Image: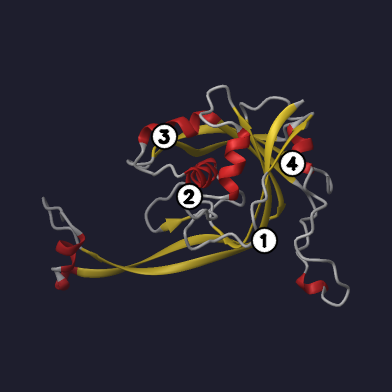
Amino acid sequence: MHSYLVLRLYGPMASWGEVAVGEQRPGAPHPSRSALLGLLGAALGIRRDDEAGQQALGAGYRFGIKLLSAGLPLRDYHTVQWPDLPKKFSYATRRQEMRAPDRLNTILTSRDYRCDSLYTVAIEATADAAYDLATLGAAIERPVFVPYLGRKSCPLALPLNPRLESFPSLKAALDSRDDETLIPEDRHHQSACLRPDRLARYYWDARMDSAGMPVTLRQTRHDEPLSRRRWQFDTRQENVYLAEGRQ
């Protein structure tokens, strides 16, 4: 038996950022490791500029995710003023950029979101964890900073409702919350009920043991935080199980 802290993530909007290049800010259909560590850091009160605290947080926990409802994709567009860059010259500040109105152009940037998505997350503590799962669960129930789903513009719509239990496998932990109803079933308001996806999808860190499910594929994610202050990330391996039906 293994101990897991099991959470439920749900919100009207979520943004799980991927590698961003230029004007594009793509998003994944399920939470990134960096986003989940950020959520735990917010609950514990670990600031982004606390390098030692962030490093300890990253070394202490691993995550398994069950995607119950991927929701609908949403793309948001922003216009940004940006000056031409003269040869052999660079702007030191944003204010200096805006002082050259004759050189200003407009670029269009995009950000990807998921609307009405639902996830179950199981947290596993390593031997190096600075906080045990019980302490972590208590912090999640009374967070120091406001937790959100990837971006500050994406608040939670329901409590995370952490539960610390022992399970024979990671899959058993991720399946343990399936019976919880977000919106009561009502035959007169079926359109208001959140319907799960036809196929369940599971994602978990390749370093986790006792998954209890086969690996359909393995993918590389660029979401292992190296430095929050410098905004640097490393790669890691993530296992994926695509279930043949609702699990």
Q: Residue at x 81, y 66 (%)?
A: 184
Q: Nearer the viewer, residue 106 or 197?
A: 197
Residue labelled with disc 4? 174
Mark 2 — residue? 144
- Callout 2: few (<14), some (14-19), or many (20+) C-alpha neighbours within 10 Å? some
Which amino acid is tagged 1?
Gly
Real-space CA distance between mark 2 and mark 1, rounded to the nearest whole angstrom: 29 Å
User: For mark 3, what is the residue?
Assistant: 53
Q: Is residue 195 visible?
A: yes
Q: Which mark is residue 71?
A: 1
Quadrant of the image for the N terminus? top right
Quarter assignment of residue 166? top right
The amino acid on which the numbered mark 2 sits, given as a three-letter code, is Val
Closer to the camera: disc 3 or disc 1? 3
Q: Nearer the viewer, mark 2 or mark 1?
A: 2
| Location of residue 85 with respect to 139 vertically, above or below | below
Q: CA distance from mark 4 to mark 3?
A: 28 Å
Residue 46 position in % (x across, y down): 43, 42
